Image (spheres, grey):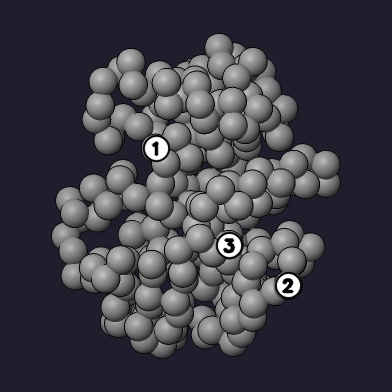
Amino acid sequence: MIELKSVSRLYRSDEIETTALHDISLNIRRGEFVAVMGPSGCGKSTLLNIFGAIDRPTSGQYLFEGVDLAARNEAALARHRARHLGFIFQSFNLVDDLTIAENIELGLLYRGGRSGSRRALVEAAMDQVGVAHRARHFPHQLSGGQQQRAAIARAIVGQPDLILADEPTGNLDTENGAQVMEILKSLNAGGATIIMVTHSPSHADQAGRRVEILDGRLVASVAQAL
């Protein structure tokens, strides 16, 4: 599904050149659940941004279903994100003055479609993560765990090919973090491809493969028995 070929990412200023990623080659198969680990500042977020077509490699190729996204223009990348990707963030990133249902519908607005069909997809996504009873509430009326479940619903409402999760349990207590992991594992069991950045070894252990990054380099890629 995904192939990185000798991907590097450099950031340059007038005086400093920083290598965030160095010569990374990595394949992700459709239906995998991959956990990316490494210390702060090692390049995990840069790698996730490249997977999400938010950032571009300085060199190398990023192939998505055989298409080199590194060579596409910004408009094409925006269409790719809308059609193929779902994003889950550590800080939830819900819009405060929209209801939960409206927040989830945001995941569909750039894809077009009639409002009736969008409502059906929103309701299905809310049911899937257990927040349908909070549809008319606002984010501040929900607990952190409920907000993250709503954010997951927003990510999956368009039935994306790839879900990218950036520290999805980082702002949650142990119980709510465990609930989010159960949802992610259920989505993966249903066929979703998931790449998750995490600092939690116990949560990384629940993925099918662990990828480790250190100083911008890929240092391990290990399949895990579940």
Dot 2, how many residues are within 10 Å of its Cα: few (below 14), some (14-19), or many (20+)? few
Residue 137: quadrant of the picture: top right
Amino acid of disc 1: Gly
Which residue is denoted by mark 1 in the rendering? 158
Amino acid of disc 3: Phe
Of the numbered discs 1 and 3, the one sitting upstream in the chain is 3
Q: Is residue 204 above or below residue 214?
A: above
Which label number is shown at residue 33?
A: 3
- Report the residue at 70% width, 65% height from top: 204
Dot 3, how many residues are within 10 Å of its Cα: few (below 14), some (14-19), or many (20+)? many
Which label number is shown at residue 225?
A: 2
Give the image location of residue 174, x and y in percent.
83, 46
Amino acid of disc 2: Ala
Mark 3: which secondary structure?
A: strand
Foreground: 127 or 104?
127
- Report the residue at 63% width, 24% height from top: 131
- Report the residue at 64% width, 73% height from top: 210
Q: In the shown orientation, is residue 165 left or right of residue 81?
A: right
Q: CA distance from mark 1 to mark 3?
A: 19 Å
Mark 1: which secondary structure?
A: loop
